[in-house]
């Protein structure tokens, strides 16, 4: 998966960017490969906003956003939201597969 990172209004430290890459690879281990991901960090008013878009091979992308006072906390919030979206999508797909023919 290609990860495109954009930082608005301020540059973010390399360890934070490595942390988001590690967390996104964790989501990919749940069972689907993604074409690419877009990560946007923004720093305004003492808060960090993290937006992530995961583009899938087929279907709609997963999109999540979170705001926190710390960059790692924002990343953790976004990853949690993406995991919930991904697992809900897998549950829907498996329910469709179990329908009687």
Image (cartoon, helix red, strand yellow):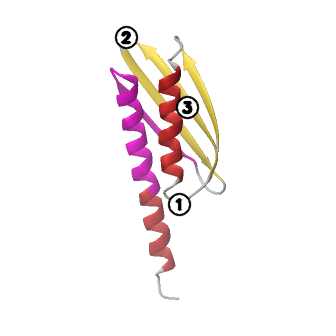
| Residue corresponding to mark 3 | 39
Q: 80 left or right of 64?
A: left
Q: Which of the 4 image quadrants contains residue 43?
A: top left
Q: Secondary structure at mark 1?
A: loop
Q: Residue at x 66, y 54 (%)?
A: 57
Say left or right for 36 vs 81: right
Q: Residues within 10 Å of mark 1 (few under 14, many from 20)?
A: few
Q: CA distance from mark 2 to mark 1?
A: 37 Å
Return the x and y of residue 52 as percentages of the image width and height.
52, 36
Which circle marks residue 45 in the picture?
Answer: 2
Callouts 2 and 1 close, C-beta under 8 Å? no
Question: Which range is magenta?
Answer: 61-86
Residue that carries the numbered disc 1 in the rendered image: 31
Q: Is residue 73 above or below residue 26?
A: above
* Mark 3 or mark 2, whichever is nearer to me: 3
Asked which secondary structure carries label 2, the reply is: loop
Residue at image location 65% in from the left, 57% down from the top: 58
Marks 3,1: beta carbons within 8 A: no
- Secondary structure of the residue carrying tag 3 is strand
Q: Is residue 74 magenta?
A: yes
């Amino acid at each position: 998966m290609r990860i495109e990172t954009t930082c608005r209004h301020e540059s973010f430290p390399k360890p934070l960017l490595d942390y988001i890459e590690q967390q996104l690879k964790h989501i990919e281990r749940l069972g689907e490969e993604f074409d690419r991901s877009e990560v946007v960090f923004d720093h305004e008013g003492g808060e960090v906003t993290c937006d992530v878009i995961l583009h899938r091979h087929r279907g709609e992308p997963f999109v999540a956003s979170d705001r926190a006072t710390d960059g790692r906390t924002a990343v953790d919030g976004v990853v949690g939201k993406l995991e919930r979206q991904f697992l809900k999508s897998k549950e829907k797909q498996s329910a469709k597969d179990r329908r009687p023919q």
